[in-house]
Amino acid sequence: MGSGDTFGMPVAHAVASGMNGLRAAGDLVARLEMTKGMRLAEAKRTVADALGVGEADLSDPLVMHEVRGQLRLGRVFEAETTYPNDPSPQEAKANIGALLAVPVNGAAARRGGGA
Amino acid sequence: MEPTIITRLGDGSAVRLTRDEIRRELEEGTETAAARAKAPPLAADELEHLLDIFASPSRFSAVDIGDEVVLSFDGSGTPQQGSRVNALLQYEQCLAADTCELYHIDYSYKAVKTIVVAEQQAMKEARERLTIPVHYGAQPDLGRYSAPDGPCGNWSELLPAMRIDEARAAQEEAVELAVADMVYVAGELWEAGADGINFDTAGAGGDADFLATLLAVERLRAAYPDMGIMVGMSGEMVLGTHGQLEYQGVRLAGLKPAGQCEVVQRAGATIFGPAVNVSTSRTVAWNVARALTFMKPCMAVAGIPVHANVGMGVGGVPMNAFAPVDAVSRCSRACVDVLKLDGL
């Protein structure tokens, strides 16, 4: 994206055109793009198929919040809605890797481990 | 009298134009770029859509529901957010980032080399605390290898003195050093758990800077088949500070976004980021039309995702650290709607 103050740049772009990250399925589609070099249309289709939802649902926080909770893929929380039994980031990333059949380096042990 | 609409100049300042004046700005922007890039101007329906976006009096503009794209957030975090990793977590939990990027304020692979263990420790913490993908990013920054900061001759001094052969030799020497540093740092951050590596503002130092990036990508791809590698450019045309450098038979000097994209994906990157710089004295509408005209041809040759650079001073976004959201949102939407990008 690029540099600039937090409200003017990342917030403005996220509201204008972003996939909503962990609020929805943005991080999942991103993983296929960045790790497999998959173009957006195919990445959205692949994630939607893996989750059993429509492509239009991928940026919908209500739909994805439930799906992510059920599949233990990690999700956002807020002060009055917490999920102490949700997976840790490492567990969530391992689940994401298995679901999408994509290597997740950030979930793997390093130096003696493997991706 | 035709009513006026508040719009912006490339420095972010407000200016009032009529709808017809905005239309002329868009037409001039695309024609200027078409002549410079030797590319087709934007089509009439694309210009009409841009006119609707820029002539709207609304404070904010956004893509249609369902047309959202992946946002790769480089340089994530500011000091007010606390530690760097706390900032990344805020990007994930509070700012809806699709990806984020750990970075050091001295955004240069050469500088990071000396503190790479500290960067690894931060990356280790980031991968333990975040679920979204985490890039590590810095700039190739070839100029750091020239005297007095580095060991090579200074081509910026040699070229004006017409010592062309020495200037070229100095750049070739710097390329080898930069490639070694980038491969080393990227490899160490990958070993610490980065999901991807970002080479930001590639080509800022000219064709030698771009060649160093491509060679580093090539070596990293061979060593780490699963590594996410993003290459973001510094401008719409690679400067020929060397002039004779090639990558796999392609002369790098003068490459525009389509040519840049072709060599970047051939080297093994997984995301390409075209960049088109902003003229601060022209309107945002003019700048967006110009940027889209430069970037559009790369969509036809791209086999990997294209994430346009739309930060401060590129992609039509005003050259201001505190850009107004009316301008940023219009640039964001215009890029996605017209180019059908994979991300920003």
Image: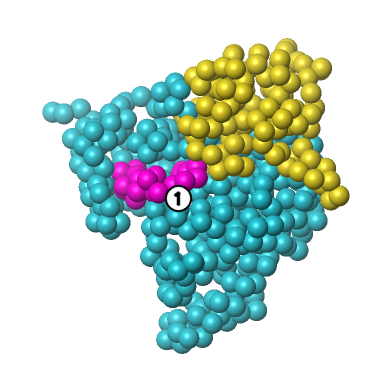
Chain colours: A yellow, B cyan
Q: Quadrant of residue B315?
A: top left
Residue B128 position by quadrant: top right
Residue at left offset 43%, top offset 82%: B160
In the rendered view, tell whether residue B340 sits above or below residue B208.
above
The kind of residue on which mark 1 rests is Pro
Residue B129 percent coordinates (x, y): 77, 34
Q: Secondary structure at mark 1?
A: loop
Is residue B8 shown left or right of residue B116?
left
Residue that badge 1 annotates: B274
**Badge 1 density bin: few <14, some 14–19, many ≥20, Cα 10 Å:** many
Look at the image and give the residue range highlighted in magenta.
B287-313
Residue B32 or residue B317, whichever sits in front: B32
Residue B326 in sight here: yes
User: Which residue does the image show at 42% across and 86% down from the upper left?
Assistant: B162
What number of labels is visible? 1
Q: Quadrant of the N terminus of chain B?
A: top left
| B290 inside magenta stretch | yes
Residue in view at x 67 percent, y 67 percent: B180
- Place of residue B93 in the rendered image (x, y in percent of width and height, measured from the top left): 67, 27
In the displayed structure image, the side of residue B264 where residue B259 appears, left or right: left
Q: Where B162 sits versus B63, above or below?
A: below
Q: Is residue B16 magenta?
A: no
Front residue of this view, candidates B235 and B339: B339
* Residue farthest left in this picture: B1
| Of residues B334 and B268, the one drawn nearer to the viewer in this rendering | B268
Q: Is residue B285 left or right of residue B311?
A: left
Name the residue at 73% across, 50% down.
B190
B254, above or below B80, in the image: below
Q: Position of residue B38 (x, y in %)?
A: 27, 57
Label 1 resides on the chain identified as B
Residue B309 appears anywhere in the view: no
* Percent of width and height locating residue A84: 81, 17
